[in-house]
Image (cartoon, helix red, strand yellow):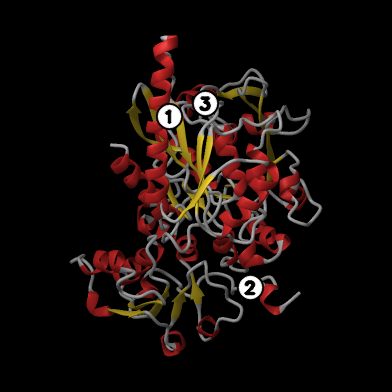
Amino acid sequence: MSEELKPPAIHFYPAGCCFKSLDDIAGKHVTVMGLGLNGGGEASVRFLLNHGAYVIATDMKSESDLQATVDSLNNDESLDKSRLTYRLGEHRIEDFENADCVIKNPGVKYDGNKFLAAARNIETDISLFLSFSKAPIIAVTGSKGKSSTVSAIYYGLRQSGFNAFLGGNITVSPLTFLEQTDETTPVVLELSSWQLADLRGRRLLKPKVSIITKIIPDHQNFYHSMLAYVNDKKLIYADQSKKDFAIFDFDSDPAADGGTLIENWGDIFAKECKATVLRYSKKQLPEGILGVWQDKKGIGKARLSTKILDTLPQDYEKTTETVLKDLIVPGKHMRSNVLNAALVLRIIGVSPERIIEVLGRWNGIEHRLEFFHECKIGKTTYRFYNDSAATVPEAAAEATQAFGKPVIFLTGGTDKGLDLSPIASGISDNGKNIVPKSVYLLAGSATDKMIADFKEEGISYKGPFASLDDILAVLKSDLESSESSEKESQKQTQNDNHKPEIVVFSPGATSFGMFKNEFDRGNQFKAKVKKVFG
């Protein structure tokens, strides 16, 4: 294996936090590495300034690239900006050597980084939060479904009367609400593998409930090893105890292999974990296995032990209860995510009836099969869905199947070292798949790999297109042409039965190069669709 393809070296951080208390931050010199645009860097700067630190915000991106964040900080009159220094477009080694602490960006590798090697102490926004909040933590990681799961849990908690908070990888730093938390305020954290790796050795993450959603190969351009990637995921339950709960997948999936010959990571997690283990499945769990599953009609069932049920405020007649029925959000994979949310709500004491009612009202989250626009061309209504957060091919393939009917499928983007074939195999005409009505490709290095797969499977496509403007212009022209043709046909058939058509943008790849990130990609897509399609 060549040097550049080795997995990142495992790094252990000292236990605890370099700050002994929040008051200890005052007067310290802290370098925030990675100001960024997603909120984490900005939140760290604000938090540290508000607690009296001298802050250097450094980022390899230029000030113009980070203008939105810089303006947000500079326009806030409540901040003492005399203690803030920007170092943009570069890193300086002395800013790391002389700092009492460096706040690390989770996407930066520790090994081989001379700046981090020079730091006396390294923390992250997550490690600071966990050090100083007494809130019970519900932590979620995985490859697919993390954001949907945490959002459904958070929604369910708030609707059930809990003063809950949501943060982490979902672009909200928990530092923004740390001082509003206490022992009574559940905090739901979405944690990426990188955020978890930055907690290794600290012994700070002890969630009351941990969940690992579906595991498939991801971020292999960073890890170059499925085992290294999964080992970071395992940190979510490393410091749990028997009084805590851990929720793992029960189903085997060949897509989980990643060259490891392991198709069921949930079994491995369950054997290692010290917490009380619950499982989730798309089919009924065997007797003796606690957790949730979907019956043949998609109804969500939960089986808990009498020991667990006896701790809950409601009386119960049976140890197996219905906890999920109708949902607004489409897709079988989304139902699995919401079912995990239902399990969390149940084990913290929400009644099954309330869970069914509350989660039945949840309408999903931004950038995950998000319905955002509807228009009419001729007599046909077109509904547009933004699934820009689908950055792995399996998620994009599932998006095409989520509506139970053929969709107009927009996909493609930048490669991150993944096997892209699940998209082609997931939409091919094999007698099992729902084949898209048409496929439009957005240009990128991942798209180039998709094209080879599509040709092998005999899948027709249009593109690749160099921009969203180009792809949407051709799409509109095609839809208008289709309506004109159909109008002529209807003169003969007199058939005016038009059901809505679905247009779904699910890239199955990253966004780098053409966009700042998947959220910028989704926002641009929504804005351009509304402009082009009125």
The quadrant holding residue 303 is top right
Q: Residue at x 59, y 47 (%)?
A: 144
The kind of residue tagged 2 is Phe
* Residue tagged 3: 351
Question: Circles 1 and 2: CB distance less than 8 Å?
Answer: no
Note whether 476 is above or below 174 in the view shown: above
First in sequence, mark 1 or 3: give its number: 3
Note whether 456 is above or below 21 in the view shown: above
Q: Residue at x 66, y 61 (%)?
A: 229
Residue farthest along the right direction in this orientation = 261
The kind of residue tagged 3 is Ser
Q: Secondary structure at mark 2?
A: loop
**Which of the pair 500/212 is nearer the observer?**
500
Kindly report the distance in space between the C-alpha atoms of the residues bearing marks 1 and 3: 50 Å
* Residue tagged 1: 482
First in sequence, mark 3 or 2: give its number: 2
The quadrant holding residue 112 is bottom right
**Which of the pair 99/2 is nearer the observer?**
2
Q: Position of residue 12 (x, y in %)?
A: 63, 73
In-image side of 420 versus 30 (left or right)? right
Q: Callout 1 environment at 10 Å: few (<14), some (14 to 19), or many (20+)?
A: few
The quadrant holding residue 91 is bottom left
Q: Secondary structure at mark 1?
A: helix
Q: Secondary structure at mark 3?
A: loop
Which label sits on residue 12? 2
